[in-house]
């Protein structure tokens, strides 16, 4: 299946969770017995209740045979390069901005990092249904922000959609049409965001640990984007820190993929995909998880002590 990996960047309350719910709903990713109130990126309580996974920081939707992995970006301060690592997992970003409030400090912070890692964002001006919406000014503010953040010409040439996440639609014009739902957004993601390069899937396995969680049944779970190679359960893996020292040798006990709000076990995953692996007991964020024959870490410098990701 073809893939796209994106991040959604938004200031708190600009409608990220609502939009992701609608993307799940309209792509049919929700199972029939799942209520739509089970919010994708907000599902901590729910998941704690079920005792399975915690901190759903990633999800995926399927659109016309393409799987779109959607990664959340931290809402608050940046700890030890976390935002960069998350943005390095994706090939595109949707910048979601409230049509009344305009870009806020958090949007600026994360957008700056997204531009720096070379992403070409899609801008979505949300909550166009608000009586006090001011989309033209907000668009100008976003453009000025891109300029202030030293966006390249290509990045400045960003596509724009307008709409209402809650209303379940996005369109090229602020007036709609609304009846296509979020199809224009899905189509734009597929068109604008490059497909991950899977050519390196025959090379040795390498992945940077990006999100760390602990799970009562599986132990440590580390999420990352497979940079090269492929993995299967039971495969031996070693972990290198940023200085190239061995952290541990171990085996992958489980590979989990994000499917809607669920995590499903996989028996194979390859370069380009974002997955979570269990089975290692020491490897952490910013470490390189790799085939035993690999000697160089992917992030070849010492970095700040890792931070456990909390929402
Ligand atoms: P998040 O913090 O970015 O995840 O934002 P939420 O998705 O939780 O939304 C924040 C608030 O904005 C909630 O009260 C939503 O109901 C509301 N909201 C979300 N989308 C829209 C929209 O399209 N129009 C309006 N008017 N409100 C919205």
Image: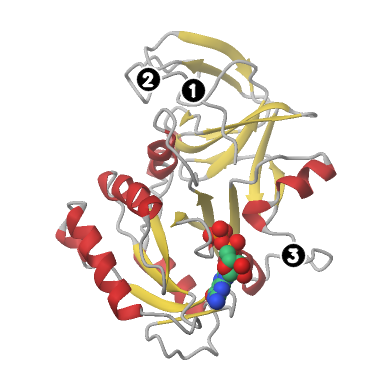
Disc number for residue 303: 2
Q: Earlier in the sequence, mark 1 or mark 3?
A: 3
Identify the residue at horizontal 37%, vertical 86% (top origin): 173
| Residue, far front | 132
- Which of these two is toward me, 32 or 303? 303
Classify mark 2 as within 8 Å of ligand 1 or not, answering yes or no: no
- Which of these two is toward me, 150 or 284? 150
Disc number for residue 105: none
Give the image's coloring scheme. Answer: secondary structure
Spatial separation of the CA atoms under disc 2 and disc 3: 39 Å
Identify the residue at horizontal 68%, vertical 23% (top origin): 279
x then y, percent, for residue 166: 59, 75
Name the residue carrying label 3: 37
x then y, percent, for residue 217: 80, 29
Mark 3: few/some/many CA within 10 Å (<14, 14-19, 20+):
few
Classify mark 3 as within 8 Å of ligand 1 or not, answering yes or no: no
Q: Are marks 2 and 1 in contact (CB under 8 Å)?
A: yes
| In this rendering, position of residue 36 left or right of residue 149 | right
Disc number for residue 306: 1
Mark 2: few/some/many CA within 10 Å (<14, 14-19, 20+):
some
Residue 17 visible at all? no
The answer to whether residue 61 is above or below residue 25 is above
- Picture quarter containing residue 174? bottom left
Identify the residue at horizontal 42%, vertical 18% (top origin): 294
Q: Secondary structure at mark 1?
A: loop
The answer to whether residue 9 is above or below residue 233 is below
Query: Which of the four quarters of the rendered structure image does ligand 1 lie in?
Result: bottom right
x then y, percent, for residue 236: 60, 19
x then y, percent, for residue 60: 59, 56
Residue 72 visible at all? yes
Mark 1: few/some/many CA within 10 Å (<14, 14-19, 20+):
some
């Amino acid at each position: 299946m073809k893939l796209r990996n994106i991040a959604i960047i938004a200031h708190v309350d600009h409608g990220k969770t609502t939009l992701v719910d609608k993307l799940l709903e309209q792509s049919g990713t929700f199972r029939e017995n799942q209520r739509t109130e089970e919010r994708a990126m907000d599902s901590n309580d729910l998941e704690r209740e079920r005792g399975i996974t915690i901190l759903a920081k990633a999800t995926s939707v399927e659109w016309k045979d393409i799987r779109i992995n959607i990664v959340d970006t931290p809402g608050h301060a940046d700890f030890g390069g976390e935002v960069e690592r998350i943005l390095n997992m994706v090939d595109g970003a949707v910048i979601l901005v409230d049509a009344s409030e305009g870009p806020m400090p958090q949007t600026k912070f994360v957008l700056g990092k997204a531009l720096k890692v070379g992403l070409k964002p899609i801008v979505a001006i949300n909550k166009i249904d608000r009586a006090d919406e001011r989309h033209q000014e907000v668009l100008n503010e976003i453009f000025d922000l891109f300029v202030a953040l030293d966006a390249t010409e290509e990045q400045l040439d960003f596509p724009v959609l307008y709409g209402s996440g809650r209303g379940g639609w996005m369109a090229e014009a602020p007036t709609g049409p609304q009846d296509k739902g979020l199809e224009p957004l899905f189509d734009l993601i597929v068109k604008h965001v490059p497909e991950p390069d899977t050519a390196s899937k025959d090379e040795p396995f390498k992945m940077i640990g990006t999100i760390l969680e602990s799970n009562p049944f599986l132990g440590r779970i580390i999420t990352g984007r497979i940079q090269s190679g492929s993995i299967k359960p039971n495969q031996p893996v070693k972990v290198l820190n940023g200085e190239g020292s061995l952290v541990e040798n171990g085996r992958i006990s489980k590979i989990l993929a994000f499917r809607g709000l669920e995590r499903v076990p996989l028996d194979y995953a390859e370069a380009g995909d974002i997955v979570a692996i269990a089975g290692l007991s020491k490897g952490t964020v910013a470490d390189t998880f790799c085939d035993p024959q690999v000697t160089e870490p992917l992030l070849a410098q010492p970095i700040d002590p890792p931070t456990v990701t909390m929402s």
